[in-house]
Image: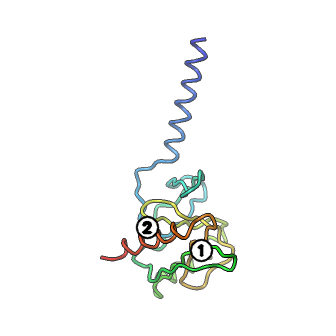
Amino acid sequence: MKFNTALLTLIFVLNFVQSYSQNSDETELTTGWYFESDNNDGIPRKMFKSEETVFLKPEPIIEIKDFEKLELYEGRDGFVGLSIQFDEGKATENWINATERAYAADIRLALIINDELIYAPRVASPVYAGISAINREDLTKEELMSFKNKLEKEKSP
């Protein structure tokens, strides 16, 4: 009986340590868009309001300094989203290249806000404009407004 209890305790501890190591990382990700790592060897982040863990490459594609305009919008289905427009120079070029690459490689792009994974969509087709959006139907208008406020606060000097 003692052996079974000790074995179960050991299994529990090992599962906890494995889970902890997969979901925690000392690397802090700055606010911006990132590529998903294509072989799960990147920086793990758990998705906001989800149990899903996504592994990310550590270099941002586009940083908060490149976010030019933030705007809440209502979609045709009645859900609310947050559009993010980039500056028309290098950031837009980076976004076009990133969406082409993500589409071709079938990897996701991920939005980090204050080191938290907010959104990681698959790219259905390349985007040939300097705009992205958070359009998760499970996010409330209040949550999106909170993200907008965090982004505006982080962007301002």
Q: Residue at (62%, 81%) from the top-left corner?
A: 127
* Residue 46 higher or lower than 120, as above or below: above
The amino acid on which the numbered mark 2 sits, given as a three-letter code, is Thr
The local secondary structure at tag 2 comes to loop
Q: Residues under labels 2 and 1: Cα distance?
A: 21 Å
Quadrant of residue 109 in the image? bottom right
Q: Position of residue 114 (x, y in %)?
A: 42, 63
The amino acid on which the numbered mark 1 sits, given as a three-letter code, is Val
Looking at the image, which is closer to me, 31 or 72?
Answer: 72
Q: Position of residue 92 (x, y in %)?
A: 51, 83
Q: Position of residue 19 (x, y in %)?
A: 54, 41
Q: Which residue is mark 1?
A: 80
Looking at the image, which is closer to me, 22 or 38?
Answer: 22
Say which quadrant the C terminus sits in: bottom left
Q: Residue at (54%, 25%) from the top-left corner?
A: 10
Tag count: 2
Mark in the foreground, 2 or 1: 1
Quadrant of residue 36 in the image? bottom right
Q: Position of residue 69 (x, y in %)?
A: 46, 83
The local secondary structure at tag 1 comes to strand
Report crowding for label 2: few under 14, some 14 to 19, many 20 or more residues within 10 A (C-alpha). Answer: many
- Farthest residue, direction left: 157
- Farthest residue, direction top: 1
Report crowding for label 1: few under 14, some 14 to 19, many 20 or more residues within 10 A (C-alpha). Answer: many
Quadrant of residue 113 in the image? bottom left
Say which quadrant the N terminus sits in: top right
Q: Which residue is mark 2?
A: 31
